[in-house]
Each structure stands twice: as structure tokens, then as C-alpha cells.
Image: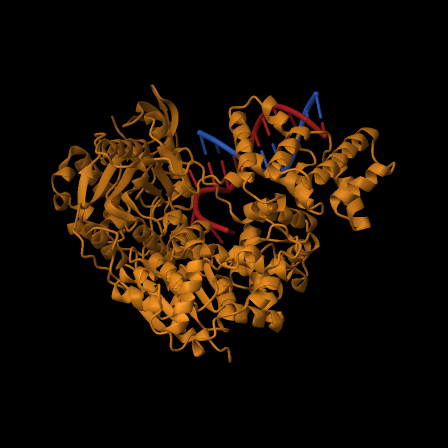
Chain colours: A orange, B red, C blue
Amino acid sequence: MSASGPLSDPRKPPRDDAFDIPFDLPDGMPGAPSTDISNPGIRPGGIAARAQALANPGRPAGAGAYIEGLNPEQRAAVEATEGPVLVLAGAGTGKTRVLTTRIAHILSLGLAWPSQILAVTFTNKAAREMKERIGSIVGPEVEGMPWLGTFHSIGVRMLRRHAELVGLKSGFTILDTDDQIRLLKQLLQAEQIDEKRWPARLLANTIDGWKNRGLSPEQVPAGEGATFAHGKGGKLYRDYQARLKALNAVDFGDLLLESIRLLRENPDVLAEYHKRFRYILVDEYQDTNVAQYLWLRLLAQGSRNVCCVGDDDQSIYGWRGAEVDNILRFESDFPGALVVRLERNYRSTGHILGAAAHLITHNEGRLGKTLFSEGESGEKVTVTGAWDSQEEARAIGEEIEALQREGHGLSQVAILVRASFQMREFEDRFVTLGLNYRVIGGPRFYERAEIRDALAYLRVIASPSDDLAFERIVNVPKRGLGDAALRQIHDHARTAGLPLVEAARELVASEELKPKVRLTLRDLVGNFDRWREQMARLPQHELAEIVLDESGYTEMWQKDRSAEAAGRLDNLKELVRSMEPFENLIGFLEHISLVMDAEGAAGQDAVNIMTLHSSKGLEFDTVFLPGWEEGVFPNQRALDEQGRAGLEEERRLAYVGITRARRRAKVFFASNRRIHGLWQSAVPSRFLDELSERDVEVTESRGGSGWGGGQGGGYAGRYGYGPSRFDEAQTFGSSYSTPGWQRAQNATRSSAAASGGKSSGGFAERGSRYGASDAARGRVIEGELIAKSGGPPSRFGRGDRVFHQKFGYGDVVAVEGNKLTVQFDKAGEKKVVDSFVQAP
DNA sequence: GAGGTGGCGACCGAG
DNA sequence: TCGCCACCTC
């Protein structure tokens, strides 16, 4: 690679505008940013800084202020602009700051134009933040950075420009999971595969997995292709790709896979990008999967100025193909790489850091970093037990109200849950309390049915060949175009080789349809023609309003008397409103296919509720971590599917959660939780034990009953993954000498005895909460007990009188394993777990 | 073709 | 328990 880096001749500022502008021309894509032309990324200050940089290459002007506040390691990472650099950045060590300052540094030294920097993140949120922060250093110059974005958005950008080279047209549509599933369903039906045994969703996951690993249909190992539907997996993948091409569509995985193919098969295109990307920066490198890694490596071969920032302790996306190996392998991939470790934590207090650090040492296979802080030790991390998930929500609600009374802002409080189903309890509670909250990354706005319907209308208008969109709304609202009519359109489309809309148009002109169907279809096709014609004249949000109105879609929900209809209408209004800022319809559609988050009530003072996954990269003064129970966190499925690796990933997730907190981290667990509508006794998470004792304080929920109660709680004894300090009440002092605690201890001992005292065995059983039938079977995962739940057959029989903490007295009417159906005197019939009740 | 119902799996997670 | 989907009836 003879690419002469800018440094080789500092007097020659990068002048690529000659190829820059044609390269970035909207090429018929009205959605492409116009800033590339109107604003080549130069501002007066920038020019001045560059001039000075040229005059004095060693000590450039403007390289002062923003570098001043950096510590020596950060500074090294920022200033080593040339050659490969790996920044191992622990939580809260100023990782984003390094990345953004580095970009600002490159810009102000005049080493590259903004358009010559490739900066990749995983989430839109991260990209947005990075853009903001760079903007605050370098000003509007940041607008000239078209290559700052997520892997996916940059992939789209590349593909749009060279679509024809990979067999697509530049207006291709991007399918989301929903479209993907529907398409796969059609394929499964065509192959006469039983969808019960081989669900489309499973196939979608399988294909995604292959794509994450950078495998095209030809590259899938034969054995793997055969695992789905008696050897049909490989063929289905091939068929699926063919269908996508025919539809001029790609799925998320293709955005990378096809980009890789584009670069591999077209050396001239690759060379162009090599020339273009003088500097490459990658955020969260530990989360890259194989496809992303291959993509990056191809591009980085050019300038070799690649800077990856990551933290192996925060790798939490193994399930979607992330390879921690990528980060571990960096030095051999890029010989001579500079490795910078950032270990000075600026975020959290000593106790929080201590607890998190001690937890993460339980993982093997880390690069190993020791975070330290020079700040105060602050408040200890609290661990609080609650009777059930409702009490947990109540307790957290009370603590938040207390904080609020002390003058703390709500937006500095976050509740981080493991799984989104845990959110509802908090939402319910906060609604009752009148406490403002916002759910981040919750039920996605653009995935709601009404929004997807509306978008489907717009997609058909924007690209008439979007068959999937057309299919979605032919008969929404119901207009009498059912399966039979659709099949006719399909048949004609296939024989004539036309998109569905065109096929429909021809059928309308013919005599083949029933008169009624023909009339309806004619109207529909006519509507689309009219709307398409209006698209040129009207702003997209006005068009959307007209479409929703004239299609009868709005009316459909107005007539709907169900509870959620009003909310859906609101969502539609919100959708129309959110379209305004865009240049045109196509620009909007492009945006939403990639950006699935609608930041609703941003800016308002509200408690943040989100999953641990989406909390990565954020920080809050106070962080609540509810649901630390075996099965919930660590998540049972992660353990079942990934074994030890899954457990370690869960632990990293716990680490991420704790390290989000600046001043207060508050962990909760509930003794009882309703899962699949069944009350289950829960066992405190093993992660509680792994928090260093000196950094933790155990408190009792103000709600009263603590976490004891009539169930086998003590997690070590019964669950046997090692001794737990929770087994010994005195370790934790007075809180655990409560009657509830004592009861729990007794229950622990008795049930451990009943289960044969297999406390040090090597079994992992599927949690009874996920199916009692196989609770008796064991499973060895690398010789370590990953999880064990379920229990001995019930000590109760039909007709026994029992007492339940929550439901009171009742009679056992049925027994199934350790699950009882009890007719309670007051609460009615409930299914409960045996250990949850006691003899009266 | 529309509307109702019963059975079953889900509740892990980004773009 | 909840929501979805397949299947059934009118």
C-alpha cells in the first residue's frame, strides 16, 4: 500500500474536493444530503487553523484548548493520529471524549477534510452524540462529516452509490424484521415446510447469524445449512437472497454483507474508498461481529490510520455475533499498533467502582484493566430485597420521590432492567404516582402496526415496485380485497413479470376480476397514481395526511372502539409531525428504515427506564438495578443457550449496569415474580454475592416483608453454585436477622435436603419457570453449575389446605410437579409453586 | 371474505 | 397472563 499519508507532505493539505463532489453527488437520490455540495466543510476558523497548521506543522494552532483537559493516556490516544491505534477504555474513562477530540484534532491540524473521516458507531444514539460533541469543539464543520454514522447507515450509503455493482437498483428498499419474517413465511410455505416445527422467526435468526459471520449462501458450511428443516436451510437462504434481489430489497445483514462483496469484487471502488478514508475511527470495537470486522479491515487497508476504541468488559452483544476476539486480536491484525489503556475513571465514586470491579473479576478471558478513581468513595451500593416485583417497583418509586424532594432532577435517575417485560411494573407504578418517566428503546415507535401500515402506504407511493408494502395494505382498511383477489394479482404479476401494483393495474383493465373487486382495485390503483403525482408538489407530511385520510386508514381507527385506538391515532399524528423536518418523502423513508428510535418527550425532566443493553454509553447520578434474580438476571435463556460464555456476558451486563452510576447504584431483587402469568418464587442473583462486601450495604425494603417469606430462597444452598454470604445472616448484620430471613433460611435448608443436597453437582437444569417437564433432567455445561431451579415433587396433595402470603388460605385442587393449582378462599383459583405456600 | 375463538408460545437484545 | 396465529363458522 503506497498511500502517501498527509503527514508525508504536510505542506500539501488533503485536496480531494475534485473527487469529493462527484462522489457525493446525490446521483438521483433526492434523500442524499445537500451539505456535501453547499458546505464542503470549511469554516473561517477551519481555514485559519489549517493555514497555521501548514506554517507550523509541529505545533498547530487550535490544538491547544481541547487537548489541555486530557490526561496523559487520553492525550496519547488523541495525538497518535497515524497508524493503527487500539484504545482500551474502561467504563467512564472518557472514551467518547477521546474519540471526539481525536476527530477534532485531525480536523484542526488539517490532516483531512471532514468528509475523509470514517467514524462508525453501533447505535444511532451514539452517532448523534458523537456528532454533537464534535460540533461543540469544531463548530458547524461537523456537518460536513457524511461518513459519521452506524455501520448500517454507512453501509446503505455505500450501496446506494454502487447499487448496480451488486445487482441492485439504487432505490432499493431496506426490509425490517417484520418484512423479513413475512417473506420467509412465503418461502417456507412454498417449500411445504411445517411452520410450527420450523418457524420463520427461527430461520430469520439463523440467516442473520450467517450474515453476522459474513457468510453468503455459498459459504455456509454444509452441515450448518442442513440443521434447519431437514437440510433445507442452505437452500432457503439462497432462495431468500434471490427473492430479495427480485424485490430490489436488502435486509439489515445485507447492508454489510453486500458492502463487503462490493469492495471485494470491485478493486477500483475499494481503491476509491481507500483514497477517501484517511482516518477511520470505530466506537465499541468489542461489539463488532465478523462481518463488521471484515468490512473494517478492507477499508483500513488503505491509510492504515485506524483507531478502535473498546472495552472487552463491556462486550454484551455476543448473541448477535459480536466477537470479543476482534479486540483481542487487534495487535496481530495491525502489526505495530499502539495500544493505549484508559483506566482512570472520572464517572463513579469509589464504592461503585469497587463493587463493579470485584464483580467483573469473576470473568475469565479478559484483557484485564484496573479502573481507579481519585474521587471520594461516596455512598455504598445498596442491595434491597422486596417481596415481589410490585413491591420492588413501589420501593423504587418511593426512593425516587425522596430524591426528588431533595432536589435531584429526575432525568438524572435511571432504572435499568434486564428485559423489557420488567418495565411495565415501573410504568404502572409511576403513572399511579404521577411521576414523569420516559422509556428509552422500549416498544419501538416505527414497529407499531399503525405506523408500519402508514409507512407501507408511503412506501408504495415512493417506490411502486415495493411489493411487500403493497401486500401489507391492499386490504387495510378492509376493502374486500382478500386472499383470493391477492392471489390473482400475484399470479398475474408472476406471469407478466411485473410488480404487484402494475399487475393490479393490468388486471383492472382486463375482464378477469369480479366486478366488485375490479372496482375497488381500480380505485386503489387510481389513488396511488394520484398520490404519487402529488408527491412532487406537496410537502411529505401534508401528503401523508391526505393519504391516511383518503385511504380510509384514519377512519378505520376512528371507528375502532377498542382501548388503544385513540393512542394509535395519536401515533399517526406524531408520525405526520415527525416527517416535517425532512427534505422529501424519500429522505424520510430512508431515515426511518435505519433509525428506529423516536425520541418522544426528550428534554423533559423524567425518570429514564431502559434495558441494560441500551444503557451502554450513558451515565446517571442514580441508577436503580431491579430484578437481580436467578433466571431473570442472569437470564435463564442466556445460560441455557450460551452456557459459561452466556454467564460471563450476563456478568459484563451487570458490570455495565453498575458503572452507569455516578453517585448512587441501587440493586433490588424480588422474592416472587410473575412469569407467564404464574407466580414463581425467585432466587437472588449470584451476582449479588460477587459484589465486594465492603462496597455494599444491605437494606430492607420499606414495604415491610423483606425478601424472606415462605419459599426456598437461599441461593447457594439450594442452587449449589458455591457458598453464598447470603446463607449466613450475620454477615450482613441485623437486616437479615428478621423473621422473614429466618424463614427463608429454614426453607433453604429443608428444600436443599429434599432435593438430595446436590449442592456441588455439575448440573444445570432448565428453570421450572420455563417448563417444568424437563426440570428433572440435568445438563452439564462445562462442568460448572450454571443454574438450577425447579424442585422436588410437591409435598402437598389434592385437597390439602394451604396458606399463601399473598392470597391467604385455600385448597389444593391440582398438583403438577411442584406446581399447585389452589382454590383460594378470597383470591380465587391461582397457580402457584409449591414452595410458595405452607401448611396452615 | 369477515369475524370469532381456542391453542400455544413468550419474557433478551440493535440496526 | 397476554397476544398472536391458525383454523373455524357464517
Q: Nearer the viewer, residue A226 or A411?
A: A411
- Write the residue at 57% across / 37% down: A451
Q: Is residue A132 above or below residue A296?
A: above
Q: Is residue A221 visible?
A: no
Residue projecting furthest to the top = A826
Determine which quarter of the picture holds residue A794: top left
Which of A91 and A194 lies nearest the eye of the viewer?
Answer: A91
Single out the residue that lies furthest toward the right: A511
Total residue callouts? 0
Q: Is residue A354 left or right of residue A774?
A: left
Q: Quadrant of residue A107?
A: bottom left
Which x, y percent locates residue A102?
A: 37, 63
Judge left or right: residue A250 versus residue A112.
right
Tell me residue A350's x, y (percent): 19, 52
- A548 or A514: nearer the viewer: A548
Residue with the most extreme bottom position: A2
Residue depicted at x 57% and y 57% = A37
Rendered position, A574 above or below A566: below
Residue A4 in view: yes
In the picture provided, is A220 more to the left or to the right than A836? right
Q: Where the C terminus of chain A falls, by quadrant? A: top left
Q: Position of residue A741 (x, y in %)?
A: 18, 37
Residue name at image x 67 percent, y 58 percent: A168
**Which quadrant of the structure image shows residue A588?**
top right
